[in-house]
Each structure stands twice: as C-alpha cells, then as structure tokens.
Image: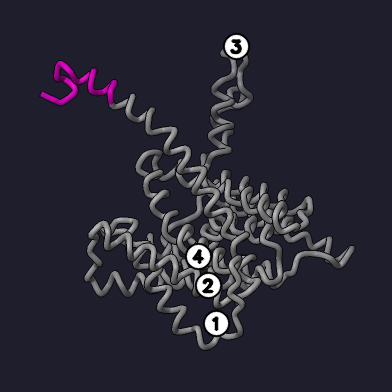
Amino acid sequence: MSFMCLPHASVISKLSRMIQRRKAPGTAIAFGVLALIWGSSFFLIKLSLEGLSPGQVALGRLAFGALTLVVIMLVTKRAWPRSRRVWLHMTVVAATLCTIPFTLFAWAETMVPSTVASIVNATTPIMTLLLIPLVMPKDRLSRAQTIGLVVGILGVVVLVGPWRMVLTGDGISLPGVLAALGATACYGFGGLYMRRFLTDTTIDSITIAAMQLVLATGLALIAAPFISTGPMQLTATVVAAISALGILGGGIAYILYTGIIRTWGPARASTVTYLTPVVGVTLGALFLGETVHWNEPVGGAIVVLGILASQGAIERWIDRGARSKPADEPACEAATPPESRLPAA
C-alpha cells in the first residue's frame, strides 16, 4: 500500500501545503535580503577603494568571506573533503569564480561607476553561453540559446554606448568595461568547469563555498606581493565596507541562497540575478551621486532579455499566447500545408 492510500494521507498533504505557504513569506524576505546583499557588492567595492588598492579589496573580501564560512563549517560540524582530485579541481574553480573576477571587478571600478559594474555583472549567463563550445565541446547551443547570445551581445554594445565616445568623448571607460566583462567571463568559465568536472560529487553547497573561498584566499595571498601593494587608509567606512563585502556577500549570502533553493527550487532562486543590477544602480545613484545614462539601464534590460530568450522563456510565452486564442480564430500555421512547413529546430 502506497503512502497516499493511507486514511490520513489527504490530511497530511493539506498540512504540508499549509506549512509550505507559511514558509513562503520567510523565503520571500530571504530572497529580498539576498538581492540587497549581492546588489550592494559594487557599492561596497567603490567605498572600499577609497582606502585600498584593487588587489587589497579582493584579498580583504576573500579573507572575511573565508573566515565566515570556516566558522560556519566548525559550528555545523561539517567535514572537509579528503579527495585530492576534488581539491585540485576546486583550485581552478576558486581562481575563476573568486580570485580573478573579484580582482578584476575591483580594478574595473577604479575606471567605471559602480552602477555600470553592477549592470555588466548581469552578462554572466551570456558569457556562459559564449564559452560552452570551449569548455563543453560536446554540448551544442540550441536555437533559443543562440538567439539569447546574440541579443545579449547587442545589450553589451548598447551598454557601452560607442556613439557617446565618438560624439561627445565622455563614454564609459573601455578598459573598465573590458575588465568587468573579463570578470563575468571568469564566472561563466568557472560555472561550466564545475559542471564538467565536479557534477559527480556529493558535497553540500556550504562546504563547496568554504573550499572556494579558502583556496581563493590562498591564491590571493600568493599574488599579494605583486597586486596588493600600496598604502592603506583604514577609515571606519573602508573597514565597514570590506567587512560587509566579505561577511555578508561571501558567507551569509550562501546560506540564504541554499535555503531559497531548497524551498523554491534552483530555477526560481536564480532569478535573484535580475534584481542585483537594480539594487546596484539605485545605491550608486543615490549614495555615490553617480550619473546614469539612458543607454546603461537599456543595455542591461536587453541583456536580461537575452538571458530570458536563452532560457526559452520568450518562446514559451509566445506558445502560451497562441494556445490561448479562441477556437474559432484559426492560427496562421493551420492554413499552411503540412508538406511546406520547415522542420523544427
């Protein structure tokens, strides 16, 4: 006899749904807090740069994040993996998901506003699509992914606004934008690398995050004599910014994200990336006095549209609209002879 055939199965099912509904507000709050934490990262980087060099910002961010997650590992009594293979692969992941992109974003923000950096960060899924043929050669881009990639690249061009450079000479710093795009390319590569080489591991997400940040901190310390030199001005603002950047963005955010995934699922949880540019632009404009040109949010919106297109969301909306037509209103497709239709892609 299956569980659902038991006399009280319907009552238990109703109780389960009630519990899920009660959890929903708490998850929604966690979702909003996560968007604020990740969206404020670029604002906090800009504040940290008032007293630290880009390399020092990256190192401080990693060190505070690693310390936070190590404490969480100790409190929750999680065990560190012993597999040498896992640690070697995680070193590559740590470099491409943490050390290099954190340094690049900090360097980029010495040349571009935090508002622009936060918008460019939204190109990570587009960069992931661009790198699939390189990292996952057996995977082919679908039609929806190809369309999304083209639209996303168009969004980046609009964001950069090359016409502003030609007409007025006050365009966005190209080296700064390229540094930020290099960071998102690292994110895309690191995510694909994990998918290719670490999908068979059973390590939980908090342990994975702790490994990343510990290894990334080690790599940053090795590079410190070359990229983290220079005087430091540790004002209260700088210390608070770099601490929040590491503790909240590197430690607490992972816990929130894990909880949201468990309640809402990974697809819905990942939509937080659509809100982070909104938070970043708002904080930069309100508290740093950064000017937002029309092409920057428009370019960001086109990038988000490309992401939605790559996920097949636009095609699903079109299909849903076609299915909702009245029965007495024939679709154009129905009038086309079957033998003349193109094969589905």
Q: Any mark on residue 58, and which? A: 2
Question: Which numbered disc, 3 or 1, marks the residue closer to the eye?
Answer: 1
Residue for point 36% across, 62% down: 69
Helix, strand or loop under label 4: helix
Residues tagged 2 and 4 counted as in contact (Cβ below 8 A): no
Local crowd at mark 3 within 10 Å, few (<14), some, or many (≥20)?
A: few
The residue under label 4 is 243
C-alpha separation, residue under disc 4 versus residue under disc 3: 63 Å
Residue for point 40% across, 78% down: 218
Q: What stretch of residues is rendered in magenta?
A: 1-15
C-alpha separation, residue under disc 2 versus residue under disc 4: 12 Å
Q: Can residue 184 be seen at all in this image of the molecule?
A: no
Residues tagged 4 and 3 counted as in contact (Cβ below 8 A): no
Helix, strand or loop under label 3: loop
Is residue 12 toward the left or the right of residue 332 in the image? left
The residue under label 3 is 328
Residues tagged 1 and 2 counted as in contact (Cβ below 8 A): yes
> Looking at the picture, how far across and down is residue 104, in whole percent?
58, 72
**N-term mark: 3 or 2:** 2
Residue for point 61% across, 84% down: 231
Local crowd at mark 4 within 10 Å, few (<14), some, or many (≥20)?
A: many
Question: Which numbered disc, 4 or 3, marks the residue closer to the eye?
Answer: 4
The residue under label 1 is 228
